[in-house]
Image (tube, grey):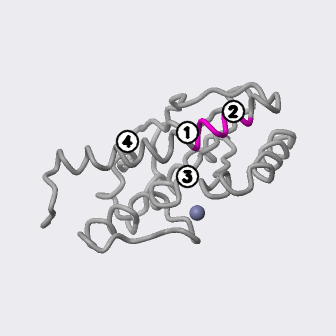
């Protein structure tokens, strides 16, 4: 693959983008929770998935989905976890997770980015499926929704917390 960055440099660049975008959004949600007395959550708790037969079908681009290799146990680390209720909450960055309204595709290294972003979306679906099979409920909130309509997001979470499994 031709790439302007070396491997190490690229992963450094990417981790910087990731941490900048996501951390701010997660902190905003944590703040919202505290302000509205939503408790029982923890951040970045590791949930061990057992792997297993139904994890990955032959059609999925397995190579792009490193944490969920076929037949292998893997760990999921949702942005917020409500352990007692078995709820997993993700705040998805618009760029990294392909928000329908704000997904952009960088013009440089098009092939790399297409694979990378497609891999992210595929992994999100696999993670959702694995969690649900393990009797977790999963909620994903877009970064942009949280920025633009925090109250609506809050209501969505509250509703989700009040529904019995
Ligand atoms: Zn968006």
| Helix, strand or loop at mark 1 | loop
Where disc 2 sits, the SS reads helix
Q: Which residues are magenta?
A: 25-32
Q: Is mark 3 within 8 Å of ligand 1?
A: no
Which quadrant would residue 58 be assigned to in this image? Answer: bottom left
Q: Residues within 10 Å of mark 4 (few under 14, many from 20)?
A: few
Looking at the image, is mark 3 or mark 2 nearer the viewer?
2
The residue wearing badge 2 is 31
Residue bearing mark 1: 78
| Circles 2 and 4: CB atoms closer than 8 Å | no
Lower position in the chain sequence, tag 4 or tag 1: 4
In the foreground, 8 or 127: 8
Question: What residue is rendered at 69% in x and 57% in y?
Answer: 148
Element type at mark 4: loop
Q: Mark 2 vs mark 4: which is more N-terminal?
A: 2
Of mark 1 and mark 2, the one earlier in the sequence is 2
Which of discs 3 and 4 lies nearer the camera? The answer is 3
Q: What is the quadrant of the N terminus in the image?
A: bottom left
Which numbered tag is attached to residue 72?
4
Callouts 3 and 4 close, C-beta under 8 Å: no
Which comes sooner in the sequence, label 3 or label 2?
2
């Amino acid at each position: 693959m031709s790439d302007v960055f070396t491997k190490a440099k690229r992963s450094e660049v990417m981790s910087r983008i990731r941490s900048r975008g996501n951390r701010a959004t997660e902190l905003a949600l944590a703040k919202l929770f505290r302000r509205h007395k939503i408790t029982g959550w923890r951040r970045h708790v590791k949930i061990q998935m057992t792997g297993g037969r139904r994890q990955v079908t032959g059609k999925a681009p397995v190579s792009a989905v490193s944490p969920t290799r076929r037949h292998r146990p893997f760990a999921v680390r949702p942005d917020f976890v409500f352990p007692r209720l078995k709820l997993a909450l993700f705040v998805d960055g618009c760029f990294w997770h392909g928000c329908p309204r704000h997904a952009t595709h960088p013009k440089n290294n098009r092939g790399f980015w297409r694979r990378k972003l497609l891999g992210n979306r595929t992994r999100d679906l696999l993670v959702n499926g694995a969690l649900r099979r393990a009797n977790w409920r999963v909620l994903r909130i877009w970064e942009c929704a949280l920025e633009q309509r925090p109250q609506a997001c809050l209501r969505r979470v509250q509703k989700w917390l009040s529904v019995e499994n």
